[in-house]
């Protein structure tokens, strides 16, 4: 999502993207494939890292250092149906057996459009992204002015 003219953001979109990207890269660093037993750990690590940065940077921006926003961070890790590296690519196999799962996610809220907002990020890891790992990672950040 680009900077939205309808509301102010507590941090610029470029900084939100950096925070989310660094959190995902750190959490997923050594992983080579989707591992369901690790998803709770990955999600918790990403969420806690993002929250820590958001709270720190937004408080620093406030004159009195008091929290100016409440933060909500959601992560979703989506497993591909199988590892595309095994037996060719997703395009080589029947659509029902290999490739990505369909997913659609949406959020809505009733709030002050001038001070509250949301932003989403799809993680693209360096060196080929999460496609090679057999997963997609989406991070959503919402803020509510205090």
Image (cartoon, rainbow, N blue to C red):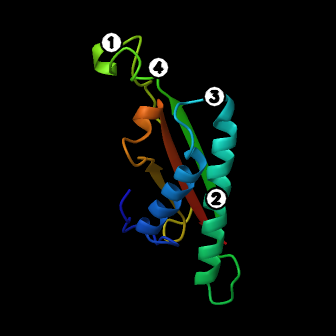
Q: Circle 3 sits on which residue?
A: 36
Q: Is residue 99 left or right of residue 26?
A: left
Per the rendering, the mark at residue 93 is 1
Give how far across and how far down residue 92 sits, in percent: 28, 15
Give how far across and how far down residue 79 sits, in percent: 52, 28
Measure the C-alpha gap from mark 1 to mark 2. Answer: 38 Å
Mark 2 crowdedness (10 Å alpha carbons): few <14, some 14-19, many ≥20: some
Which element type, helix, strand or loop, lies under badge 2? helix
Residue 60, quarter of picture: bottom right
Give how far across and how far down residue 119 sits, in percent: 47, 56
Which element type, helix, strand or loop, lies under badge 3? helix
Residue at 56% x, 38% y is 31
Mark 1 crowdedness (10 Å alpha carbons): few <14, some 14-19, many ≥20: few
Residue at 59% x, 75% y is 57
The answer to which of marks 4 and 1 sits earlier in the sequence is 4
The answer to which of marks 2 and 3 sits earlier in the sequence is 3
Mark 4 crowdedness (10 Å alpha carbons): few <14, some 14-19, many ≥20: many
Per the rendering, the mark at residue 49 is 2
Please state which of residues 83 and 115 is positioned toward the viewer in this rendering: 83
Mark 3 crowdedness (10 Å alpha carbons): few <14, some 14-19, many ≥20: few
């Amino acid at each position: 999502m680009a900077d939205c003219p309808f509301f102010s953001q507590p941090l610029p979109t470029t900084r939100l993207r950096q925070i989310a990207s660094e959190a995902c890269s750190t959490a997923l660093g050594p992983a080579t494939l989707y591992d369901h037993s690790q998803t709770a750990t990955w999600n918790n690590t990403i969420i806690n890292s993002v929250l820590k940065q958001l709270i720190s940077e937004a408080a620093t921006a406030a004159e009195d250092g008091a929290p100016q926003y409440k933060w909500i961070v959601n992560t979703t890790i989506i497993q591909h149906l199988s590892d595309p590296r095994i037996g060719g690519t997703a395009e080589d196999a029947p659509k029902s057996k290999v490739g990505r799962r369909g997913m659609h996610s949406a959020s809505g809220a009733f709030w002050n459009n001038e001070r509250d907002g949301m932003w989403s990020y799809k993680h693209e890891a360096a060196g080929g992204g999460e496609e090679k790992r057999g997963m997609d990672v989406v991070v959503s950040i919402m803020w509510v002015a205090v």
